[in-house]
Image: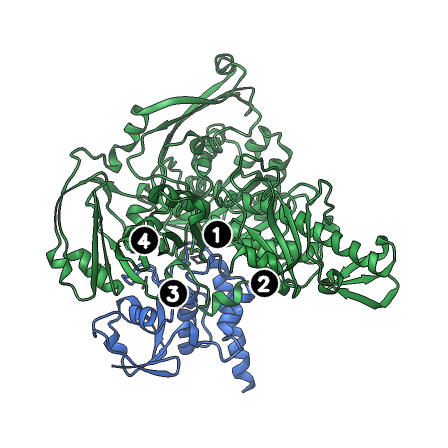
Amino acid sequence: MRLLVNGASYEVAVHPERTLLSVLRQELDLTGTKYGCGEGNCGACTVLVDGEATRACITPVVTAAGREVTTIEGLAKGETLHPVQAAFVEHTAFQCAYCTPGFIMSAVALLGRNARPSESDIRSALSGNICRCGAYVRILRAVKTAAEQLAQAEGKA
Amino acid sequence: MNLRDLQQDAGLIVTGAPQMGQDAAVPGGTEATLLLISKQGEIYAFSGKVEYGQGIRNGLALAIADELDTPIASVRVILGDTGLVPYDRGTTGSASTRTIGLQLRRAAATARRTLLALASERWGVPLAGLGIREGRIVQAGEPGRSLSFVEALQGRRLTVSIPEDAALKSPGEFQVMGRDAHRIDALARVTGQAKYSRDIAVPGMLHGKVLRPPSYGARLARLEKARAERVPGFVALVQEGDFVGVVAESEEGAEQAVASVYARWDEEREHPSDWDLPVQLKERAKELAVVRETGSLEAGFAQADRVISGLYFVPYVANAPMEPSAAVASWEDGGLTVWSGDRSPFGVRAQMAQAFGLGEERVRVIASEIGGSFGTKGAGGAAYEAARLAKAAGRPVRVAYSRQEEFIWGTVRPTALIEIRSGVKADGTIVAWEYTAYHANESEFRGMRGSDTPYSIPNVRVTVARTESPLRSGSYRSLGGAVNHFAREVHMDEIAAALERDPVELRLANLEHPRLRRVLTQAADKFGWGAPRRGLSVGRGVAIGYDAGSFLAECVELRVEGREVKVERVTAAFDGGLVLNPEGVRNQVEGSIVMGMGTALWETVEFGGGRPLNPSFSRYRVPRITDAPQIEVLLVGDPETPSTGAGEPGIVPIAAAISNAVYDATGVRIPELPIVPHLP
Ligand code: FES
Ligand code: FES
């Protein structure tokens, strides 16, 4: 089966029902996507599939075949962080940061479909992600900052 | 990397006791390498602490960079690798920065003094005019003259021990400490590069999974393994007594194999359930320890115009860090290396050495990044399991817990039942205070924390009993501190309500402690405590607290809507003395508030039949971003007072402040956690 991950193409010989999370982590060695619950409850495993936030832990790899998968490792362009990543750094929107890749991917998906989200849009888009360290107020701040920055960049373009 | 190579390649080595005031009885002795400067000019600092989100790597790097006036990029902090770092008892949140940070600052100050002395000799000028700027030694009034550390060392290899009188910078001289800065590990964390325990892979590694008994204390009666052996990728099955584990080529293979094992267990018949707890806690209480006895309760109650009694209950709650436990173990030439996400690498080393009959020098434990702990991950369970399986399989093995395993086999915060009786005069003066707490605990100490009252009461008796714990209880942010504070600060509110007094004012009337008075007044002012109510279902609550040497007060505003409680804003005033890293402190206090909201409103481990019944995030409700209130943290400490803990204190007042605010909104007093299921 052919997987398109972060712009690269991989031929993988795996059981089609295996989870996308397991294939990313074990076969492609992309360990930035995390396991937190394995049942779709925590968002730690969030990746983009064709731009949409997807829980990799409950997604059979076959459903992602041939579609565009983006993980946390594929977000920065060379040395330049994605604005959501940069905003997480700026606001220290984490403590242990185990949840961070999942939150960032959920936020990127949100900003992809809604460039000017309200605070409640942000909250509901991230409601499936858990941060047990409780960095929520910082995460909110970071996503707002990233949204403003993207809007500004758009305005200039 | 090993320590000997680093030492060989060093230009300057600074040694000292791993922690301030450490005694010689500690393994590893009193002198250890704390800091070194390599021949290339890199600065290495060593600490047995681990990073589980509290930002210790960042805090230590800032402190060293500041004492040495050197760019932070040249400082490498090595944490929790028993092959490299000095012995450490284990990381327990709040004490880290204080003890280790201070000693590493002294090590850096020693390096500074040594380097300046070398430059003074070389240039033939007095020490007084020399300083360091941006990692180069400079002389006042000689702008053209400078030396790098490497040049100052001139190829020498010096070892110096920290002198008694190592002079530290004063807060006014700090360049980076005390200011807001991005965390140095931020980049790795937002790009997915940071390696947590279950991200570690070594060549030839297999995957292990342990067969879990159906209930605590169950004994294996019969095992059939034929089906497991036929699972594709199966490598080995290990049975040693009641321990059964399988090893396979992939994680899924191991899961499938363990699910294919047929096992019959003999289970204990009598298991308590969470319903039995309040009664059991008191009935099975072991020795009562008197924490404080002042004055005479009898005389106190005789003077009182009112006697108020309360009973408070706090259930078991789960730490549930986002990263479930994991470890990798590898045997080579009879020696063992373990990569683990435990918060006590030296504890794990001792445990492994004992379990396998090895000398401690044959075991190396390397701490990975840790995806949250809050007190759990201290027992080395995954590490031990991985080491057993790796030994049997003859290849490295990783054991990574599922969420359910973490819920069931991780530790939980002990439950407690607390009785308070207070005697109060009509003017609001508390004259008698009788406090009896029953904490489900193996260790008395845990229940004692925070049990004493900080109010000025002439007649006091505080006693704490430990009692059997049906679940695997362990540490949790501030241990019993948050539990004891809940009871005491709700009771203070009950006194205020009984006398129709304002809760802030009644507390102040009974409070002499200057630091607590200050945090309470400042939190209440900033919060707008006196402002008129915003609506019928809106309530306000307050509570104060002390923990890990720090003091704080929290004010909460919330809305009760049907059977939901929406916390809208929290104002905290925190006094942790001198603040070296304000962003880090605010972050910790905010996180503690959010975590404490969960324990206040929803969290409880339901159990019965010898196991937790809700081991999943769908049945164990934790705070989510939709629940997050506005949080304002005021740092009000005096910079002349030494730094105290910041990782835990934030949690101690919050549950009481929330319960008090629910009372304010609804007129219903809820002395039992979690609150939401008890709403009328
Ligand atoms: S790991 Fe996928 S949602 Fe929790
Ligand atoms: S930062 Fe630790 S779980 Fe979010």
Gap between marks 2 and 3, in whole Å? 27 Å
Residue situated in front as seen by the camera: B476 or A108: B476
* Position of residue B433 measured from the top left corner of the image (x, y, whole percent): 49, 22
Q: Mark 4 points at which residue?
A: B386
Say whether disc 1 or disc 4 marks the residue closer to the N-terminus. 4
Q: Mark 3 points at which residue?
A: A124
Q: Chain B is drawn in which colour?
A: green
Nearer the viewer's eye, disc 2 or disc 4?
4
Residues at badges 1 and 4 in contact (C-beta under 8 Å)?
no
Nearer the viewer's eye, disc 1 or disc 4?
4
Can you tell me which quadrant of the image ligand 1 is in?
bottom left
Q: Mark 2 lies on which chain?
A: B
Q: Colour of chain A?
A: blue
Q: Mark 2 points at which residue?
A: B182
Q: Do labels 1 and 4 share a chain?
A: yes
Circle 1 crowding by C-alpha within 10 Å: few under 14, some 14–19, many from 20: many
Gap between marks 1 and 4, in whole Å? 32 Å
Residue situated in front as seen by the camera: A154 or B53: B53
B356 left or right of B155? Answer: left
Q: Is mark 1 within 8 Å of ligand 2?
A: yes
B58 left or right of A106? Answer: right
